[in-house]
Image (tube, rainbow, N blue to C red):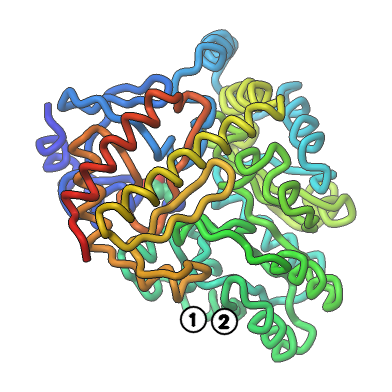
Amino acid sequence: MHSDELFERARHRIPGGVNSPVRAFRGVGGTPRFIARASGCRMWDVDGNELIDYIGSWGPMIVGHTHPEVVEALTEALARGTSYGAPTGLEVELAETIAGAVPSMEMLRLTSSGTEATMSAIRVARGFTERSKLIKFEGCYHGHADSLLVKAGSGVATLGLPDSPGVTPGAVADTLVARFNDLGSVSALFEAADGDVACVIVEPVAGNMGTVPPAPGFLEGLRELCTRHGAVLVFDEVMTGFRVARGGAQARYGVTPDVTCLGKIIGGGLPVGAYGGRRDIMERVAPAGPIYQAGTLSGNPLAVTAGLVTLRLLESDSVYAQLDATVAAIADGITALAGEAGVPTVTNRVGSMWTTFFHDGPAVTDWNTASASDTRRYGRFFHAMLDRGIYLAPSQYEAAFVGLAHTGDAVEFTLDAAREAFRAVGPA
Ligand code: HOZ
């Protein structure tokens, strides 16, 4: 069966034909490719096309698809059972490995998704501070929990949805929205909330409005404001954890949050999430404390096995140097090729994440600037790249992810494709 036939069938039984909105290609038009298999930095669709994959399952596949060590460990684990609903030694090992790499996570709890991690972190922050309000940032996305679906990035931004029906006014009454990279907007919300802010939640490097780095001093300023106002600083490092550095954005920028959310890489491509932080906060989580949170598949042995092997493969500093160098080559190449073709772009990159915004510049620093991108031109570029075997995110408002399997050949092939794709898109 081909992608168009499968999509037709899927739309009868699955809303929009997909199990997560962005992958339906609404942001770029056309029919999503249905994937048959993957290996290293490549995927093959059911139509027989080979694609260099810069989505990497939206971040987890940093060591490449079907890495032999991950596959071997999973095969062995599979024979021992897929889920027990009881604790295992592997979970302890993963918690210790994470805490070793991210020292601010003195204690942590595993979940089955990033959404569960962020919604639980918010609950814990509220329970711990006995306050109600949270501050989030326009264009940041923290999963689909009701209280966080306000001015959100990712699929919400891609589909141009202002809010989601089904989220009641009551559910978002305590959600305050600030501008990313604008400490003044955060300060004003703290003042107006009159001591009722439980937490500030932020993607320390935004990835869900496209890649947007924190301005110098922004994360430090959030730390200072949260400390001054007695609020919990939550870093959503679902995307950046073990990606922009082994210790995540907090290690890269040297700013310590109170609570961190993880997902993606720590499950090595299987469903997982984690939240954790200061011991005095996490000791309030049930059954140690009264704040309730649970999950049947939390700490699933297969997910934990894949995560442990993946984190072991990322142990050396040299892997992060390699990832940075790969993205630098791609981002610099793309910038030069866009310039040659007269196509206005702004390319942001941090570690192994990058986004090329089809934007007049001079910079993309927040949702206001990101949303001024020419999404139609992005769509044309996306398809020109896809036709040439390069699989980018089907939305201007997502990051591209590079992994250890993206070697020089793949980069060269990508830049050759980009040269032709920019020509196909044409000057502004
Ligand atoms: N919203 C996620 C990316 N930021 C996942 C998208 C998907 O899996 O379709």
The quadrant in which the N terminus is found is top left
- The disc labelled 2 sits on which kind of residue? Ala
In this rendering, would 269 be left or right of 241?
Answer: left
**Residue at the (69%, 48%) spot, across then down:** 275
In which quarter of the view is residue 185 placed? bottom right
- Position of 23 with respect to 380 (left or right) is right
Rendering quarter of residue 333:
top left
| Contact? badges 2 and 1 (CB < 8 Å) | yes
The residue that label 1 is drawn on is 169
- Residue 270 % position (x, y): 51, 31
Residue 186 position (above or below residue 331)? below
How packed mark 2 is, by other alpha carbons closer than 10 Å (few <14, some 14-19, many 20 or more), is few
Which type of secondary structure does the marked residue at label 2 adopt?
loop
Question: Residue sitting at 66 percent across and 24 percent down?
Answer: 308
Q: Nearer the viewer, residue 39 or 83?
A: 39
Which residue corresponds to the image point at 71% horizontal and 22% vertical from the top-left? 90
Q: The residue under label 1 is which amino acid type? A: Pro
Q: Give the labeled residue for mark 2.
A: 173
The local secondary structure at tag 1 comes to helix
Q: In the image, residue 404 lies at what x, y percent?
A: 52, 26
